[in-house]
Image (tube, helix red, strand yellow):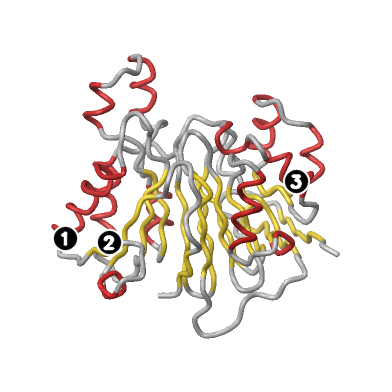
Amino acid sequence: MRKRNSTFNNDPRQYVIDFDFDDEPETGTNPAFRYISFGSGSSGNSCYIGNDNGGLLVDAGIKLETVQETLRTNGISIDKVKGILLTHDHSDHVHYVYKYLRKWKNLDLLCTNRVLKGLLTRHNISKRVTDYHRPIFKEIPFEAAGFTVTAFEVPHDGSDNMGFSISLGDRNFVLATDIGAVTARARHYMSLADYLVIEANYDAAMLRNGRYPEYLKARIATDNGHLCNDQTARFLGEIAASDRLKWVFLCHLSKDNNTPEKALETVRKTLLEKGLNIGGTEETIADRSADLRLGVLPRYNPTRLFVLRD
């Protein structure tokens, strides 16, 4: 039986959350992250991050059937998935959340109280979603499915917006989607990533010359909007010089204002200028010998199962 234990001593920095999911953390000298993206973009977002013992979903904007079938074909039992982390309350990240929770009783909803409030006030989602809620707090780590998870603030225009740093042993999988600028705290967590999912939403020229109305162009380009390819490339160029970062997945590309080719070209060019050998996300000999492996997450289709150990 699952239970939640917590202590609070006035100082919020001393608040410790322990979600007991009846699973022991993965052991071994080099445990692997397992990662699948089910879809990434304004049409819907969700992914799986797991280990040998279980895993978590991040966001719930992809149809339940797609998630279930993709997990099944990759040999992952939905019974081993312990919770859903929500990055924020926009519809493309939460649309199917209650269907997930109602269908899979083993899931908990892991989000801040402000995200839950936004979920209930901005979307046509059953208020029974609260029955599954386990509150989390930014920059206060908690244990879930054998991971240590820390939510951190990112600038965007949802009710509450966050990235996640998910730790397994001494390595970190960090996800930052829907982020308009790289703030100091976001930089801190992303700089510690071994594996990083980061937004590259738009090409600046395509947005500027595109068909969107001016108010929407302005919203996208603000610090509470989205990162463009150039911004993402500059930031990755700053942190990739360390030997820590090994994999980068570019996410949440705009259908109208970006292409996978433009995003990859922009980021790859900057990283090559830093003297790095850049590989892809396949399993070729060249990829395996690269300093850093770079890929783009598909908008509509699931990826293969990535086993991230190096």
Rendered image: mark on residue 95: none
Residue 255: % across, % down: 38, 33
Label 1, label 3: how far apart the Cα atoms are: 45 Å
Task: Name the residue located 58 percent from the left edge and 31 percent from the top edge.
Answer: 91
Task: Name the residue located 50 percent from the left edge and 58 percent from the top edge.
Answer: 165
Task: Indicate the amino acid at tag 2.
Answer: Ala
Graded by Cα atoms within 10 Å as few (under 14), some (14 to 19) or many (20 or more), the crowding at tag 3 reads: many
Q: Earlier in the sequence, mark 1 or mark 2?
A: 2
- Pointers 1 and 3 in contact (CB under 8 A)? no
Residue closest to the eye, 217 or 4: 217
Task: Name the residue located 34 percent from the left edge and 55 percent from the top edge.
Answer: 295
Q: Earlier in the sequence, mark 1 or mark 3?
A: 3
Task: Indicate the amino acid at tag 3.
Answer: Leu
Graded by Cα atoms within 10 Å as few (under 14), some (14 to 19) or many (20 or more), the crowding at tag 1 reads: few
Residue closest to the eye, 94 or 173: 94
Between marks 3 and 2 in the image, the one whose residue lies nearer the viewer: 3
Task: Name the residue beneath numbered marker 1.
Answer: 274
Residue 273: % across, % down: 13, 57
- Which structural element holds mark 3? helix
- Which structural element holds mark 1? loop
Say above or below: 243 vs 117: below
Residue 77: % across, % down: 69, 64
Task: Name the residue beneath numbered marker 2.
Answer: 240
Label 3, label 2: how far apart the Cα atoms are: 38 Å
Q: Earlier in the sequence, mark 3 or mark 2?
A: 3
Between marks 1 and 3 in the image, the one whose residue lies nearer the viewer: 3
- The quadrant of the rendering that contains the C terminus is bottom left
Task: Name the residue beneath numbered marker 3.
Answer: 101
Say above or below: 260 vs 226: below
